[in-house]
C-alpha cells in the first residue's frame, strides 16, 4: 500500500512524507489551508502556490515551505506527486501519488459545484481514492453557489429598502472570498471583520483583490448605512455586533438545509451554501476517479462507505482521520482559523 494511516496522519512510507498530518512531522504535503488540514509544527510544507498566503498568516512567515502549481510533478524518492484542483477554496488541491503503477488520489475537502473563484474540481483517474463525506447522505442536495450568491445580493437589496445593514456570517477562508468575488469592485459599502480582512490582504500577494473595508475600533454606527458586512460566525451574539445598529443577519452553511435558520438562535436567514460536495457530487467524483478502492474519511463515513459498497459495488472502507467537520465547527463559533 502506497499510503496508510498511522498516529501522525496519512503516511507515504516510500517517500517518507505525510498528507495533512495531525501531529508534527518532518515533511507535510498539504491539501488546503483550513486549520484541521494544515496544522502547525511541521518541519517542511509542500503547498499549492495559492495556499502560501494562508500558510504565512496561520503558520508563520518564516516557515520552511515549497509551493507548486496545479499539474506540476514533484518526485520524492521515486514517488510522483502532483496537485490538482479540488474546487473547495482558493489553493485547495487533491494530491495525486504514483509509484510503480499504483495511483492514489487524496481529495482533502472538495466540491464539484463552480463557485466562480476556486478553480473547478478536476477528475483524476486512480486506483485508490480517498474522499471526505461531510455531506454523505442522500438528503444533502445543494444548489449552485452562483445561484446562492444571487440570493445573497437580493437579500442585501431587500434589507437596504428597509434601511437595514446586512451581516453575512460565513467561513473567513473560502466562503468569504467567493461571496466578495461576486460583488462589483467599485462598491464602497462593503465591510469586513478583521479575520476576513487579514486573509484578503494576504491573497493580494498572489494576485487576488477583494472588495471591502476592514472594520476597526474607529468604526461606529455612523459608518454603516445599508451596508454589507462579512464576518465569521463566532461574532454572533458578541458585543461586536452592536456597532451596526439596525441589521439583519444571515448564516451560510450546508447544515442550513437540515436545520434551517429558524431553528438557529440569533439569525434571521440561512443560506444553504457549502464548500463541500453534496451527496450526488460525491457519487460523481467517485465514479469519475475510476477507482475500485475507496477510503471514506471525515463526515458520514460509516453510511457513505456502506452506500458505496452496496449500491456501487466498490471496495469501500472507512479511513479514520482526525480532520474535523469545519462547517459544524463554524456553526458552533469554533472556527480555529485565527
Ligand atoms: Zn476545508
Ligand atoms: Zn476537511
Image (spheres, rainbow, N blue to C red):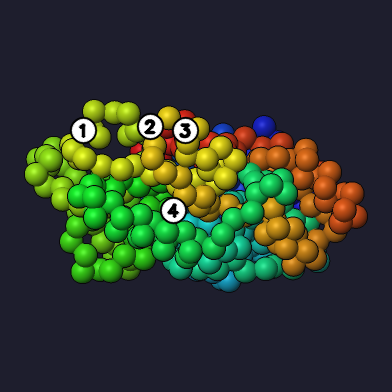
Give the distance between the C-alpha atoms of the residues marked 3 and 1, in whole angstroms.
Answer: 19 Å
Mark 4 / mark 3, whichever is N-terminal: 4
Task: Decide if residue 311 is in sight here.
Answer: yes
Q: Is mark 3 within 8 Å of ligand 1?
A: no
Q: Position of residue 144 (x, y in %)?
A: 54, 63
The residue sitting at 89% across, 49% down in the picture is: 310
Point 58% across, 71% down: residue: 71
Q: Secondary structure at mark 3?
A: loop
Q: Is residue 319 left or right of residue 314?
A: left
Task: Of the two numbered discs 3 and 1 on the same chain, state the one appearing first in sequence.
Answer: 1
Callout 3 touching callout 1 (CB < 8 Å): no
Q: Are marks 4 and 2 in contact (CB under 8 Å)?
A: no
Q: Tag 2's secondary structure? A: loop
Task: State if disc 3 and disc 2 touch (CB < 8 Å).
Answer: yes
User: Residue at image x 46%, y 68%?
Assistant: 116
- Mark identifier at residue 242: 1
Name the residue tied to disc 3. 264
The label number, if any, that marks residue 174 in the structure image:
4
**Which residue is nearer to you in this view: 246 or 125?**
246
Could you tell me which quadrant the C terminus lies in?
Answer: top left
Q: CA distance from mark 1 to mark 4?
A: 26 Å
- Residue plotted at (35% across, 47% down): 168
Mark earlier in primary sequence (1, 2): 1
Q: Which residue is denoted by mark 2 in the rendering?
A: 266
Q: Earlier in the sequence, mark 4 or mark 2?
A: 4
Amino acid at each position: 500500500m502506497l499510503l496508510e494511516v498511522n498516529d501522525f496522519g496519512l503516511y507515504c512510507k516510500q517517500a517518507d512524507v505525510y498528507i495533512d498530518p495531525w501531529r508534527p512531522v518532518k515533511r507535510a504535503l498539504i491539501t488546503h489551508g483550513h486549520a484541521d488540514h494544515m496544522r502547525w509544527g511541521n518541519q517542511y510544507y509542500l503547498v499549492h502556490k495559492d495556499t502560501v498566503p494562508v500558510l504565512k498568516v496561520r503558520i508563520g512567515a518564516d516557515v520552511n515551505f515549497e509551493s507548486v502549481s496545479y499539474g506540476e510533478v514533484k518526485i520524492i524518492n521515486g514517488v510522483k506527486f502532483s496537485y490538482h484542483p479540488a474546487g473547495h477554496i482558493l489553493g485547495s488541491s487533491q494530491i495525486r501519488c504514483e509509484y510503480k503503477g499504483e495511483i492514489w488520489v487524496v481529495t482533502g475537502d472538495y466540491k464539484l459545484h463552480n463557485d466562480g473563484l476556486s478553480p473547478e474540481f478536476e477528475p483524476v483517474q486512480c486506483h485508490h481514492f480517498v474522499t471526505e463525506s461531510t455531506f454523505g447522505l442522500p438528503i444533502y442536495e445543494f444548489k449552485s453557489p452562483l445561484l446562492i450568491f444571487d440570493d445573497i445580493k437580493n437579500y442585501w437589496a431587500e434589507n437596504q429598502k428597509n434601511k437595514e445593514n446586512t451581516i453575512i456570517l460565513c467561513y473567513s477562508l473560502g466562503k468569504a472570498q467567493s461571496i466578495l468575488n461576486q460583488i462589483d469592485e467599485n462598491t464602497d459599502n462593503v465591510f469586513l471583520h478583521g479575520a476576513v480582512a487579514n486573509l484578503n490582504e494576504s491573497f493580494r500577494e498572489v494576485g487576488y483583490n477583494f472588495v471591502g473595508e476592514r472594520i476597526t475600533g474607529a468604526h461606529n454606527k455612523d459608518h454603516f448605512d445599508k451596508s454589507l458586512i462579512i464576518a465569521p460566525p463566532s461574532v454572533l451574539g458578541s458585543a461586536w455586533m452592536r456597532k451596526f445598529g439596525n441589521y439583519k443577519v444571515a448564516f451560510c452553511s450546508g447544515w442550513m438545509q437540515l436545520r434551517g435558520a429558524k431553528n438557529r438562535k440569533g439569525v434571521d436567514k440561512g443560506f444553504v451554501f457549502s464548500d463541500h460536495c453534496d451527496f450526488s457530487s460525491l457519487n460523481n467524483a467517485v465514479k469519475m476517479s475510476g477507482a475500485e478502492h475507496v477510503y471514506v474519511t471525515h463526515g458520514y463515513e460509516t453510511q457513505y462507505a456502506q452506500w458505496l459498497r452496496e449500491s456501487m459495488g466498490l471496495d469501500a472502507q472507512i479511513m479514520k482521520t482526525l480532520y474535523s467537520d469545519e462547517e459544524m465547527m463554524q456553526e458552533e463559533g469554533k472556527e480555529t482559523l485565527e
